[in-house]
Amino acid sequence: MDVFAGFHGRVLAAVQQLKHDGVVPHEASLDGITLEPPKDASHGDLATNAAMVLAKAAGLPPRKLAERIAPLLASDPHVEKVEIAGPGFINLSLAPAFWPGVLRMVLELGAAYGRSAIGEGEAVNVEYVSANPTGPMHVGHCRGAVFGDALANLLAFAGYAVTREYYVNDAGAQVDALARSAYLRYREALGEYIGAIPEGLYPGGYLKPVGEELAAHHGKELLAMQESEWLPIVRSTALKAMLAMIEDDLSQLGIHHDVFFSERSLIHGAHDEVAETIAELKAKSLIYEGRLPPPKGKIDEEWENREQLLFRSTEFGDDQDRPLVKSDGGYTYFASDIAYHRDKFRRGFRSMIDVWGADHSGHIKRMQSALAALTKGEAHLDIKICQLVRLFRAGEPVKMSKRAGTFVTLRDVVDEVGAGSVRFMMLYRKNDAPLDFDFAKVTEQSRDNPVFYVQYAHARASSVLRQLGEMFPDLVTEGNDLARADLDRLNDPAEVALIRRLAQFPRLVEAAAEAHEPHRISFYLYDLAGDFHGLWNRGKDLPQLRFIYEGDRELTRARVALVVATKRVLALGLGILGVHAKHELH
């Protein structure tokens, strides 16, 4: 299926031949040998660095070694030309007769095209969103939610067994603040004037229904209780309502989790898993009683001048050791987080991916080192940071504050521009780069709007098939039938360029999955759409290149095969991103 994997195997076979001939030592490693499309398409279809990787081991200048490899590759009947470039790259140009076979494969495989088995069914836990359950999802949560969900889709497409997880932070001070805020709304629902919401509580009107629910269920009985009595009751009701709201908000983007894991369950479950985790780390001599020095050059209100339990995170590159127990006896967030990842490991996950916000980037090394210590290196944790989203309206930035109640909700954005547009645009930048979300840009119909440009390509392909039904109503457009068309007639450079782009999809899926970078799919789709639109525009200028050519049924059949294949790959790529492919644009 993967053209690049196939030719990579041929490069390795050529090197093995040189090992057999004594040109390259038998012990020379082949791990660094790659096969990529050249950055400049005029340099050919494929390029390998084999000669540069093996030059030192062979004791030859890279170009000299390339001269030994090139003839072995040139003997392949699918290779039209081999050239040595630069310091020793070997560029391959494939024969025109090779590309119809690629298109045929795309058509025959249909929805299976691009799917990979590299995951080999390995269990992967992808934890994303995990926003504090204190209110509706806002646009700041949106990027991590979309990124995590698309990454989970991508990994599943590549053959991994993916579990999508949400870590519910229901054990910290913020949920007690939520409960106290809901209690005020409860008193309000009973007819009491509550005045302005105090500083530190949540003022949003979204808690009014929670107050009304508490009033309907408990009447005035909570008023007679001490805070220690009513707090857990109100907290439970408020958390349940907030999680239901969050799930509903996420569903507007097509996001659904398999597991909602409670932080509180780690401490108040059948046994205290945080205490167990600390005991394990202590047994490994990674915890000690000590005193942290005051922060240098800044005031840190959380710093405490006291003896406390510390994790030796400086042994793993952190700038200071980290506390595990607070002065009030409660666990730090870091301690609970270590226990949570230990729990994932005990559930069978050796591969874990966390999607965090930019404000947590300083925690990465300590979390990875703690997990490595607990699992003796058996577990691998990749933490992906999603940078901030800057939201603009009418050229002015929109400021958000959950506590002030002035945030723009995720639902607001989805309602205005649509789930597909939100998802695509959130994935049209690498996750660790800041992203500007401009309402005007996302809704304009131009090449400068990537989501429109890609959806327009799919809609255009759909329109070709509708027109075909009017002109050739008996022409079958199923992939297997079109695979038997005379695809050798697709010899215009723009047609061949489009097939080349389709050939890149399987390799791209695997590379994106291995790198945990779903944005590569959106970039690829934009390029694929560009190739398709370019071919469409050539047909406007040159009637003989139009997809439907009334005077030549068989040529039409071959070109429709190309349209169907392109439409299929566009839909597959959009599906990985979680975007519904449109058949018409209005």
Image: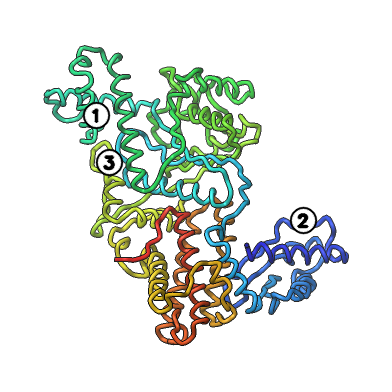
Label 1: which residue? Answer: 210
Say which element carries label 2. loop
Q: Earlier in the sequence, mark 3 or mark 1?
A: 1
**How many C-alpha atoms fall within 10 Å of the one at disc 3: few (<14), some, or many (≥20)?**
few
Label 3: which residue? Answer: 401
User: Is label 2 or label 1 in front?
Assistant: 1
Residue occupying the far front of the picture: 474
Dividing the picture into quarters, in which one does residue 492 lie?
A: bottom right
Compared with residue 184, is residue 426 higher up or lower down, i.e. above or below?
Answer: below
Q: Earlier in the sequence, mark 2 or mark 3?
A: 2
Kind of residue at badge 2:
Ser
Q: Earlier in the sequence, mark 2 or mark 1?
A: 2
Label 2: which residue? Answer: 29
Kind of residue at badge 1:
Val
Q: Are marks 2 and 1 in contact (CB under 8 Å)?
A: no
The C terminus, quarter of image: bottom left
